[in-house]
Amino acid sequence: MENQGIDIEIDELTNSVRNVISGDSFQTEVSLVTKSDLKIITKSKGWQFNWKLELKHPERDVYKLTIVNNQSIIQGLVSLEVKSDHVYLHLVESAPFNKGKSKLYTGVPGNLVAFACKLSFQRGNEGNVAFIAKTQLIDHYVKSLGAFHFGGRLMIIETNAAMKLINRYFSNI
């Protein structure tokens, strides 16, 4: 599974996450995945990636997206690595109930990418985020995230696009 490329649709850029049925928006928070979280983020529970394996990479941090005041339900996950001049996005995944036509919430993938941009600013990397995209999604990431195609399947989100994403998701902070 190494370096397959980011393969997630940015369904909607929201101010937080939005309930598909009610249309209500919910504020979110991002925190590090804990050992107890690993019991519920398994392939048998519908998650696509092996997040336990992801946590074994000491240079990577795995974060979970939850709705404020509802820490027990993970909406999505992201694996990030802080490099000397950017943050590298290894994996992004929405919870099984946030995928496909019957998803409960939109905005999860965009929220996680915006968090990566915010972390990049916090670490002095000017919001720069890099990732490998699945070939068929390159144009989608250009349109939805403002990323640019660097060559091959490498995508980069630079300072201006990063600020737009951060302002969209974290304007209330």
Image (cartoon, rainbow, N blue to C red):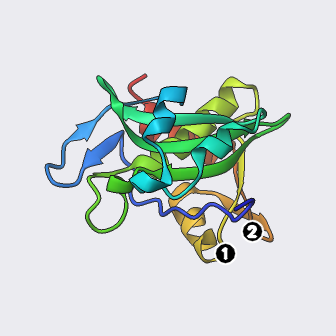
Where residue 24 sits, quadrant-wise, is top left
Q: Residue at x 78, y 34 (%)?
A: 59
Q: Give the SS element for disc 2.
A: loop
Which of these two is toward me, 58 or 150? 58
Give the mark, 1 or 2, whose residue is nearer the N terminus: 1
Q: Residues within 10 Å of mark 1 (few under 14, many from 20)?
A: some
Q: Give the SS element for disc 1.
A: helix
Where residue 15 sits, quadrant-wise, is top left
The residue at the far left in this view is 22
Do we see residue 32 in this rendering? Answer: no
Of the numbered discs in the image, which one, if any, rests on residue 153? 2
Q: Residues within 10 Å of mark 2 (few under 14, many from 20)?
A: some
Q: List x then y, in percent, for residue 114.
A: 54, 41
Q: Residue at x 75, y 26 (%)?
A: 124
The three-letter amino acid code for the residue at tag 1 is Thr
Q: Residue at x 27, y 35 (%)?
A: 26
Quadrant where the N terminus lies? bottom right
The three-letter amino acid code for the residue at tag 2 is Arg
CA distance for labels 1 and 2: 6 Å
| Rendered position, 131 above or below 143 | above
Do we see residue 124 in this rendering? Answer: yes
Answer yes or no: do the residues labelled 1 and 2 have beta carbons within 8 Å? yes
| Rendered position, 172 above or below 165 | above
Left-right relation of 119 to 75: right
Q: List x then y, in percent, for residue 78.
A: 57, 43
Quadrant where the C terminus lies? top left
The residue that label 1 is drawn on is: 135
Q: Residue at x 44, y 40 (%)?
A: 168
Of the numbered discs in the image, which one, if any, rests on residue 90? none
